Image: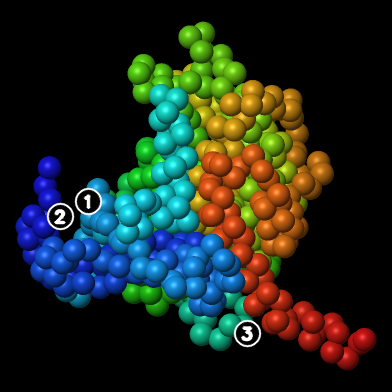
Amino acid sequence: METIEEWLKKNGIDEVEGIVADMAGIARGKFVPADKFCSHDGMRLPESLFIQTVTGTYAETDVVSDADQDIELRPDPDTIRLVPWATEPTAIIIHDCFFHDGAPVDISPRHVLRHVLDLYRQKGWQPVVAPEVEFYLVKPNTDPDFPLEPPIGRSGRPEAARQPFSIDALNEFDPLIETVYDYCEAMKIEVDTLIHEAGAAQIEINFLHGDPLALADQVFLFKRVVREAALRHNVYATFMAKPMESEPGSSLHIHHSIVDTATGANIFSDENGEPTEEFYGFVGGLQRYTPDCVLLYAPFVNSYRRFARYLSAPINVQWAVDNRTVGLRVPRSGPENRRIENRVAGADVNPYLAIAASLASGLLGIEQRLRPSDPISGSAYDLPFIFPRDLTMAVQRLRECIDIRPYLGERFIDVYTAVKRTEYEAHFQVISAWEREHLLLNV
């Protein structure tokens, strides 16, 4: 197999971006000249990068010591890619994190997913996932006090009405979309179909199914690809779960199946093509544990605005076949392709953590032999709302869920919830436009 050094030389690389994903899914790391990247003994960063909040502050937690020790970053050669927008030949490599004694950093989001996948491998199973990611294109917004607006397309006009599945609406942004596809091809990001979603200038891209860690890597890089492509066309791209109050939110749907590594068979179907106990257990696990894990599917204060009736986002964990109002949808397919679509996560998630939470919940259901409720007919929007309604409730639910802790990690849950509490406190200090509008002169 070609070494990293050989790959860098063959592609004439001058500089390397060595990155890891923090709790928010933001790329952290260093720029290193290519010759030094291959000659020195690896990169180091402080462990505290995993207690950094999206606002740039640090959570208070005793899990990371006051000494703030360095951790070692080791490149994963399977993740090396060209950076197509760089002015100089540049490569990007995702790294794994280790302590000095060689143990993995258990609060690293990439490790959390690796650990869940190891639990499947111990059973002789290989999970398969296929993400679907939504995002909005918006006008450049340099003043956060102003609401976001749809961008101007090639016609010179913004979208005035919703255009789900419209080809003409997508054509408004053809140059930008071509740039996205070119960047994805250069970075070996295996995207499939692209559609216009229900919101104004809202787009969804589907990924080809595959290994969960590889797909999480691709989604992690894809968000940066889209933002970079948009900037080159004087547009912003946002993966906020609810960027505009009058429009539907953006999601990250995750399709799941599980393959028996010995036989290659989908364990969700038996020899007669019928659903198996593992299939029902996986659905039951998602129903039981998704409300406790909502913090990993809705990680920010904005995320909870997406959960609203009749706006293309689930409000509960009902399940059904080919029904897009439920939280857990089973698409129509042949037995070999039987899969479960988790529709709960927003586009703002850290993909490593959302996929890990979904797979861990399903595995718990299989191991505990949980049975799902009966599949529904009709609209799940008419049934009760069961998710936590804000970040503080979601923090409490995750902290109190004892069963999920061994699957995601004790230290990870303690750190992650501390980060989210700190972000909530920062948000709580902000006085909103709604408060000024309705309270300033009326109370």
The residue wearing badge 2 is 4
Q: Residue at x 40, y 30 (%)?
A: 121
Secondary structure found at label 1: helix
Q: Residue at x 38, y 51 (%)?
A: 104
- Residue 267 in the image: state x and y as whole percent: 48, 21
- Residue 293 in the image: state x and y as whole percent: 63, 48
Kind of residue indicated by mark 3: Asp
Q: Quadrant of the C terminus?
A: bottom right
The residue wearing badge 1 is 77
Marks 2 and 3, how far apart at CA: 45 Å
Marks 2 and 1, how far apart at CA: 6 Å
The residue wearing badge 3 is 145
Marks 1 and 3, how far apart at CA: 43 Å
Q: Quadrant of the N terminus?
A: top left
Kind of residue indicated by mark 1: Pro
In front here: 36 or 438? 36
Secondary structure found at label 2: helix
2 vs 70, left or right, is left
Kind of residue indicated by mark 2: Ile
Task: Bin the neighbour count of mark 1 within 10 Å (Cα to Cα): few under 14, some 14-19, many 20 and up.
Answer: some
Q: Residue at x 33, y 54 (%)?
A: 101
For residue 321, say whether it is visible.
no
Residue at the bottom extreme of this rendering: 441
In front here: 285 or 367? 367
Residue at the top extreme of this rendering: 272
Give the numbered dot on residue 221.
none
315 vs 439, left or right, is left
Q: Residue at x 68, y 58 (%)?
A: 395
The label nearer to you, 2 versus 3, is 2
